[in-house]
Structure formats: structure tokens, C-alpha cells
Image (tube, grey):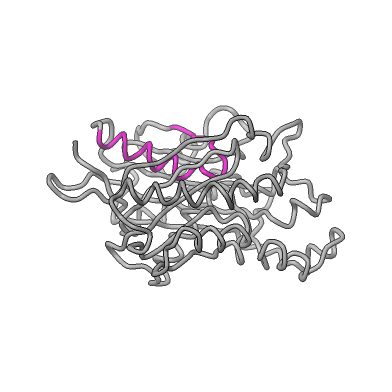
Amino acid sequence: MIGSRIVAVGHYQPARVLTNEDLADMVDTSDEWITSRVGIRTRHIAGPDEPVDELAAHAAAKALAAAGRTPAEIDLVLVATSTAIDRSPNMAARVAARLGMPGPAVMDINVVCAGFTHALATADHAVRAGGAGRVLVIGADKMSDVTDWTDRTTCVLVGDGAGAAVVEACAPGAEAGIGPVLWGSVPEMGHAVRIEGTPPRFAQEGQSVYRWAATQLPVVARQACEKAGLAPEDLAGVVLHQANLRIIEPLARRLGAVNAVVARDVTDSGNTSAASIPLALSKLVEQGAVTTGDPVLLFGFGGNLSYAGQVVRCP
């Protein structure tokens, strides 16, 4: 089977920036309290007239432009999101309509914060199986829509945004640019991260998530490297789900990726759920912190206590 590769990435964030000082005017919190506990200083918040599919379409258009591809050349659109309010049309169909695509397959994937890495694996599998030749993979979430802005334990975490990748089949005989996925979940702990109710609201059991991430995920992340035939010290970059700096930094250290650039976009963007990994990867590429061909571990984790990770080669 022919492997796949990421040929370009792109990202988008709303113009409005919400600072810790702004939040201190809304709830009982402070810049010191937020930065010391989660490492976040700012986050971008979409307006009422900026739906999830608009965020996704902006990121997708940038990725397509960077790849030198037109919307008509995409035959599968995958959107990872957990903040789609309507059941149908799904976000992928809405993005396809916004971009003027003539008739791609369109699917949403809801694995919350691990959604993008699940969607990327699905795109890779579709290409390998011959079901698609060129795939647009998007992570997009408008967490501000599902946030209780009176709850200081959650409202300080969230941000809105989108990131996208164009995935194509490799040339025959060429090395695959997307490594094997390692994925799974802990269903009995799925309640630890929730977006539920009417209206839906984000809630989590922070200490349970922290303990799980700190103790279990370093082992799983190393296994994802092993599946790609690499040791952690071979990595040029590590892009973990941007949940909390207190989770990201210890996890990266325990992984042992001593030579890698570690994405810390959570500081500026907050937790953007499924958008966080492609958003952070796109920024690293844009900044030149990682270059074409560099091996980078992408590792998502969160809602359902799901996880998915793979090593990719930078576009």
C-alpha cells in the first residue's frame, strides 16, 4: 500500500484576544493564579457571527494555498470537532460548501481533544486503502460556545481556533510521511472530561486528568515513537495537545525527547481542543522551528480519556 504525507499546514484564530486581566474582571481570578496553574496568558475568542465552520474554512484555505492545491482537488474532508451544535449539515459539509468543493466525501470526527490525531490517522488509512488520494484534515473548535464563564476553573482554560493539513499519497516507493497511529481510550474514566447538558457545557475533573496524563501518557507516547521506528531523542519536535503547560512540560521531559522543540502554544492560545495540535504545528512550521522532513510527534489526549499519536514528517 502507498503511504501518505502532510504536504502543507495552515491555521486561523479569531481577532479578539482575551487576556488574564480581562478574565479577572469577569470572575474571581488573577493573572498570577492562571499562569501559575496552567501557564496560559491569552486566548482568542470568536464572536457570535464566527461559527466553527468559518474558523475551519479559514485554516483550510491557508493550508490549501500553502500546498498549491485548489479545493476541487480534495476528495475527502475530515473535520475534528466537539463543538458542532447542529447535527446536519456537518462541519465537513459546511466547510466544503464554503470553499466551493464540487463533491468530496465529508465526515466529522468527535474525539474531543484527540480529534485531530484520530482524523489524521483516518486520512492516512483512507489513502493507504485507496479510498482517497488527497484529504483535507481540519481540527476546529469554538470552546467559548460551551464554556460556563462564571466557572473560574474552566473558563480560564479555553480558546477558539482551527488548524488544517493537506494529506496526499506518497510517490510509489517513497517513505511514508505519516507514521502508524497508536490510539486507545480509558472508557471507565470518560466522565473526567465532559461537554454535555442543555445547553452543553464543558467540565472536567482536573486532578484525575492530570494524574492520568502524568503517569500513563509518557509510556504511550514512547510507544508511538517505537511504531515509527524512532527513539524519542530522534524527534525534532513534539506537539502535544495544548491542554495545560503543567501537563505538557513534564510529559515532554518524561518522554525523553531531549533534542526536540516542544510546542507551547497553550500560553498564547489556551486550550482549543481539537484545534490545538494542528494550530501549534502550523505555528512551528511558520516560525521555522521545524523544517521539511523533520520527524515530529503529534499526540492528542483528553475527552473520553482518548489518546492518539503518530510521528509525521514536516511538510
Judge by depth and name the residue closer to the eye, 39 or 138.
Answer: 39
From the image, give the main secondary structure of the stretch colored magenta: helix
Q: Is residue 115 located in the magenta-colored stretch of the structure? A: yes
| Segment colored magenta | 107-128
The residue depicted at 55 percent of the width and 40 percent of the height is 81
Q: Position of residue 243 (x, y in %)?
A: 60, 54
Q: Is residue 24 above or below residue 120?
A: below
Q: Is residue 185 above or below residue 30?
A: above
Q: Quadrant of the C terminus?
A: bottom left
Determine the residue located farthest toward the left in the rendered image. Answer: 173
- Whether residue 129 sits left or right of residue 210 in the image: it is left
Judge by depth and name the residue closer to the eye, 165 or 71.
Answer: 165
Q: Is residue 22 located in the magenta-colored stretch of the structure? A: no
Determine the residue located farthest toward the right in the rendered image. Answer: 28
Q: Position of residue 146 (x, y in %)?
A: 70, 42
The residue depicted at 36 percent of the width and 62 percent of the height is 235
The residue depicted at 40 percent of the width and 55 percent of the height is 297
Question: Which of the 4 quarters of the picture holds residue 31?
Answer: bottom right
Q: Position of residue 244 (x, y in %)?
A: 63, 58
Q: Is residue 19 above or below residue 12?
A: below
Q: Quadrant of the N terminus?
A: top left
Q: Position of residue 241 (x, y in %)?
A: 53, 53
